[in-house]
Image: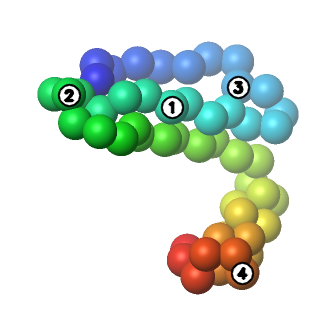
């Protein structure tokens, strides 16, 4: 995956999903969130999947 930049991210953030290079299965997920949403996401990850 090459380098890239994203301009104009809205107030609610952005999610980028890209395939892994070299034919491997899976993907890379990059998330940009508002400041207040990080705690909410961490709580959801802990509550539903036991991770964060």
| Mark 2 vs 3, N-terminal side | 3
| Mark 4 vs 3, N-terminal side | 3
Locate residue 4, reporting x and y percent: 40, 18
Element type at mark 3: loop
Q: Which of the two discs, 4 and 2, sits closer to the camera?
A: 2
Q: Which residue is mark 1?
A: 17
Q: Residue at x 51, y 31 (%)?
A: 17
Q: Which residue is mark 3?
A: 9
Q: Residue at x 76, y 48 (%)?
A: 34
Q: Is 37 situated above or below 17? A: below
Which residue is the extreme one toward the left?
A: 22
Q: Which of the two discs, 4 and 3, sits closer to the camera?
A: 4
User: What sort of colour scheme is used for the picture?
Assistant: rainbow
Image marks 2 and 3: residues in contact by CB distance under 8 Å: no
Q: In the image, which disc is placed on residue 47?
A: 4
Element type at mark 1: strand
């Amino acid at each position: 995956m090459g380098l890239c930049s994203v301009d104009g991210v809205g107030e609610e953030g952005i999610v980028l999903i890209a395939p892994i290079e070299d034919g491997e299965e899976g993907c890379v997920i990059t998330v940009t969130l508002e400041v207040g949403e990080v705690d909410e996401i961490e709580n959801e990850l802990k509550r539903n999947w036991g991770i964060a």
